[in-house]
Image (cartoon, grey):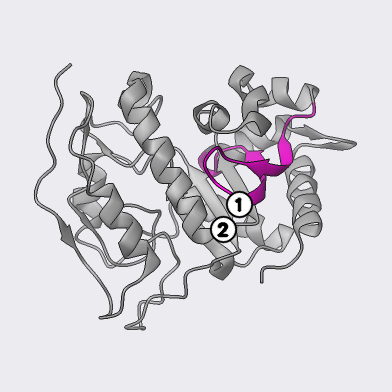
Amino acid sequence: MQRTAPPSRAVTILDNMPHPSHELFELVQQIDAFPNGVTSIPKQLQGSSFFPARVGLLVDKCSTQLPKFPVGGIMVLAHDWGTVGDFELYEKEDQERLTNPTWRNMLPFFERVGIRTSDCFFTNFFVGLRTDKSSVGVFPGAKDPVYVTTCQRLLTKQIDRQRPRLVLVLGAYVPKLIASMSDDLKPWERFDSFKAIDRQSMGSFRNVNLRGSDHEFSVASLVHPCYRQRNARNRRWKNFEGDAAEVNLVKELLAYMGSPQ
């Protein structure tokens, strides 16, 4: 299998002090080979958006300092950042538009469940860019076991650095990708649909430990915000249905885990 080597590293920073997001991006830049259909992220952009293309935090455009890294907070784990074309488009802007479907649907949901965005680190399982024009569907590197393992190790490092009390997994692709990282998540190896996992009450897990990590956290699977209006109505949690199922699922985990330190 042919692999593409990454271009030279360049990291854009907002201040002169080291920041955990920049340190984690340096680990991403150490990947020296990518599967067909995937290439490296050439640099970390300023402004708000998911890691690793940006810092994974909501950034105040008027500030010259990055927000505090939310250690002990919440990790929001998505599938992948997007395409090379997406990156080139957002490279010209100060930050990702919070009016796009992901943010437009996710931020109101967070308000309803009582999550502060300042407590969140927004990141992705896959750390490369798609070379195709479309960002929809299975990631091109998902069938490369070496690359998947590399992304799993990087995710473990992110979790060890942030030590989140809760990980919110977005969409139907990621649960299977992280299932082999922990005996506690093994049931997600059979993750075929939200309907199937809800039927077996496997929408969330408490007291999860990853192999090779001493940190314990809770995990919840949520529909992808882009398709929230279409897919959330099919969720089931205890006696709740639809949007209320996800709202109460997350609220229950937040109450169980307590406030961030």
Q: Secondary structure at mark 2?
A: loop
Which residue position is annotated with label 2? 163
Report the side of 226 relative to 147 (left or right): right
Q: Secondary structure at mark 1?
A: loop
- Residue type at mark 1? His
Query: Magenta span has 216?
Result: yes
Name which residue lies at 74% across and 29% down: 202
Report the side of 123 relative to 1 (left or right): right
Name which residue lies at 21% across and 58% down: 91
Q: Which mark is residue 54?
A: none
Name which residue lies at 54% across and 51% down: 76
- Residue type at mark 2? Arg
Q: CA distance from mark 1 to mark 2?
A: 6 Å
Report the side of 158 relative to 21 (left or right): right
125 to 15, vertically: above or below: above
Query: Magenta span has 113?
Result: no
The boundaries of the magenta stretch are 201-226
Q: Nearer the viewer, residue 3 or 203?
A: 3
The quadrant of the picture occupied by the N terminus is top left
Name which residue lies at 81% across and 58% down: 255
200 to 261, vertically: above or below: above
User: In which quarter of the view is residue 81 placed?
Assistant: top left
Which residue position is annotated with label 1? 215
Viewer can see residue 169: yes
> Could you say where residue 39 lies in the image, as x and y percent from the top left?
20, 36
